[in-house]
Structure formats: structure tokens, C-alpha cells
Image (cartoon, rainbow, N blue to C red):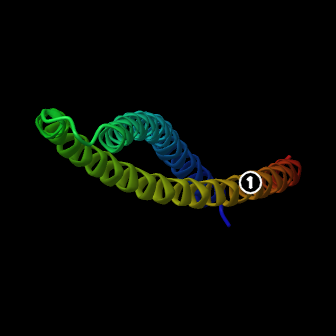
Amino acid sequence: MAKAELDAAFITAEQTFSLLEQKYQSIASEFSELQSKCAQLQSSIDQRLSELADVQAQKHQLHLQCLTHPHLGDMPLVIFSVISFLKPHLLFSGRRDREAERRFSETSTSLKLKEEKVRELETRLTSLQEEFSSTKDSAATNDERFMAEISTVHKLVD
């Protein structure tokens, strides 16, 4: 290989390495953002589950009160009022939970894809580093040989 070809290969390897490094940093940053979103969504789901448990406990308590005081005339009205009060909250909470679960699932899927892409880029980066090192070593060897040949030519000319 001529020196110019080796220099060109070296420059191309450096540029490719730099581009991969930038892509890796970009994906690593996006990965970090997705992990943060995933944690936020998990926290939101945990909060919704806690709210749901509270509402279920209240419902159970009302059910027990109905069983212990079945002859109160206004109890059905109280139960109806509580159910009327809780129903929109439960429906809204259910929609929020489904939306949070959907977003969590999408984020998890995206996170897995990004992790896979990061692994691929890390493998490619390692390969390019090895290729870069090999090209650099080869260029240095060829450069030394080229300089020795030039020195020999200069001695022959003198």
C-alpha cells in the first residue's frame, strides 16, 4: 500500500470512529432519558395502585358497614352517594392507569431497542478501534520502510 493510501485509510478510520462515538453518545443520552421516563412512569403506576388500594379499602369498609347496619333507611342513599362520588375517580384513575401502562410499555420497548443499539455500537466501536490501531501500526511500519527506502535512495544518489 502506498503512503497516500494508508493516510487516506487512516483518515477514513478516524472519521468513522468519530461518527460512531457521536452516535454512541447520542444513543447513550437518549437511553438515559428513557430510563428516567421509565422510572417516572413506574412511580406514577405505583401511586395509582396505592390510590386504587385506598379506594378498594374504602369500598370494603362501606360494604362492612352495610352488613352491620342493614336496617338503616338512609344507607342505600349513603352508598349511592359514595359510589357516585368514587365512580368518576375510579374511571379516570383506570384510564390514567391504562395510559401510564401503555406509555410504560412503549418506553420499556424503546429502552430495550436502545440498549440493543448501544450494544451493537459498542461492538462496532471496539472493532473500529482495533482496525484503527492495526491501520495505524501498518502505516507506521510502512512509513518506516518508506523512510528507509528514501534513505537508501539518497545514499545511492550520493
Q: In this view, does 91 lie above or below 121?
A: above
* Circle count: 1
Who's the residue at 41% across and 38% down the image?
A: 57
> Viewer-proximal residue, 128 or 134?
128
Who's the residue at 79% across and 50% down the image?
A: 140
Residue furthest to the front in view is 71
Query: Label 1 belongs to which residue?
Result: 139
Q: Position of residue 69 (x, y in %)?
A: 30, 37
| In this picture, residue 52 sits left or right of residue 146 | left
> Label 1 crowding class (10 Å Cα cut-off): few <14, some 14-19, many 20+?
many
Please identify the quarter of the rendering in which residue 100 is found.
top left
Q: Where is residue 93 in the image (x, y as percent from the top left)?
A: 25, 41
Please identify the quarter of the rendering in which residue 78 is found.
top left
Who's the residue at 18% across and 38% down the image?
A: 79
Q: Which amino acid does label 1 sit on?
A: Ala
Q: Position of residue 82 (x, y in %)?
A: 18, 34
Who's the residue at 32% across and 40% down the image?
A: 59
| In this picture, residue 42 sits left or right of residue 102 | right
Residue furthest to the bottom in view is 1
Q: Is residue 17 above or below residue 39?
A: below
> Viewer-proximal residue, 39 or 81?
81
> Viewer-proximal residue, 3 or 67?
67
| In this picture, residue 53 sits left or right of residue 82 | right
